[in-house]
Image (cartoon, grey):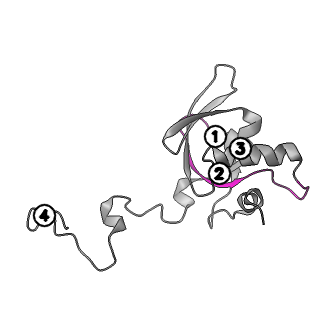
Amino acid sequence: MTTSTQARDAQAPVGAAPRPLSELRPGSRAIITAVGPSGPAAPSAAERHLTRRLQDLGIMPGRPIKVLRRAPLGDPTVFLVADYELCLRKRDAALIQVADPAAAPGSGRHSGPAAHRAPGRASTAGRSGQEER
């Protein structure tokens, strides 16, 4: 299975209703669930090339994305992904499926340093005034 096929076939989080990134409004946040054309038809060479290019730019399933702003006439749109701004045409953004971040697995958990500690280990910060080493 190729990388572009894997990205296209990636499953959305349970309970999420994936939709095209092109439908989101500025200020919206989402989680990328799939990259590439959807549907039963085999993707064209141009679609496969664009899917690969989007992946090379950091558009990967599971990655958060935010809509920053749209051009005055509605196209293109600027997105924040992987700590950089990416400008995409509406037709290209339509190849990216996204879901509400609240529906993504682990979205309710704390994402700070405590979330990355080994299970069962409590932080000593606050008790002794020093961070755990």
First in sequence, mark 4 or 3: give its number.
3
Q: Which residue is pictured at 65% across the width and 51% down the height?
A: 98
Q: What residue type is labelled 1?
A: Leu
The magenta segment is 25-42
Marks 1,3: beta carbons within 8 A: no
Marks 3,2: beta carbons within 8 A: no
Q: Which amino acid does label 2 sit on?
A: Val
Residue 72 higher or lower than 52, as above or below:
above
Q: Is residue 115 left or right of residue 46?
A: left
Q: Which residue is pictured at 78% across the width and 66% down the height?
A: 1
Q: Is residue 126 left or right of residue 13?
A: left
Image position, residue 30 (x, y; %): 57, 49
Q: Pick out the residue farthest to the bottom.
A: 120
Prevailing secondary structure class for the magenta stretch in the rendered image: loop
Q: Within the image, what quadrant is residue 120 found in?
A: bottom left
First in sequence, mark 4 or 2: give its number.
2
Judging by the rendered image, the residue that carries numbered circle 1 is: 24
Judging by the rendered image, the residue that carries numbered circle 3 is: 53
